[in-house]
Image (cartoon, rainbow, N blue to C red):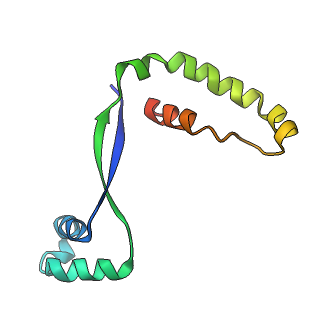
Amino acid sequence: MSFYWKLKKVDYYWAAIELKDRLPELKNADTEMIADNLRGSKLNFYSRSEKKTPFWIRVTLPFAVICLLLLFLFMPINYFITGEWGYELEFFANWMRKLGF
């Protein structure tokens, strides 16, 4: 069974609570103080949750391997035509991520 991550941006207070739970050095610190320090850092925090990959995505694995091989083989031809290595195919990248590549 394959899973991929669904990311969600969280606020500084939630991040402070998580840090307080996971780091023993912050057990005695105030949550508000931690959140204020995090606000000053201008960092972004995300939480992740597992999301099951649908069956129809997993069935496409053989076709995905063939597509990946063809894209790799035709990369020099693409370079001669466009002058850039690689491809900018966002849907293909999302498909590969869902398959676990």
The total number of labels drawn is 0
Image height of 41 relative to 63, above or below: below
**Which one is in front, 89 or 15?**
89
Image height of 23 relative to 49, above or below: below
Say left or right for 95 vs 48. Answer: right
- Residue 22 visible to the viewer: yes
Residue 51 percent across, percent down from the top left: 30, 36
Say left or right for 34 vs 8. Answer: left
* Quadrant hosting residue 33: bottom left
**Which one is in front, 1 or 36?**
36
Residue 101 percent across, percent down from the top left: 51, 34
- Residue 101 visible to the viewer: no
Residue 95 percent across, percent down from the top left: 50, 31
Say left or right for 28 vs 49. Answer: left
Residue plotted at (37% across, 79% down):
41
Specify the quadrant that holds the N terminus.
top left
Residue 42 percent across, percent down from the top left: 39, 76
* Quadrant hosting residue 59: top left
Residue plotted at (71% across, 41% down):
86
* Quadrant hosting residue 77: top right
Residue plotted at (63% across, 19% down):
66
Residue plotted at (19% across, 76% down):
26
Say left or right for 38 vs 80. Answer: left
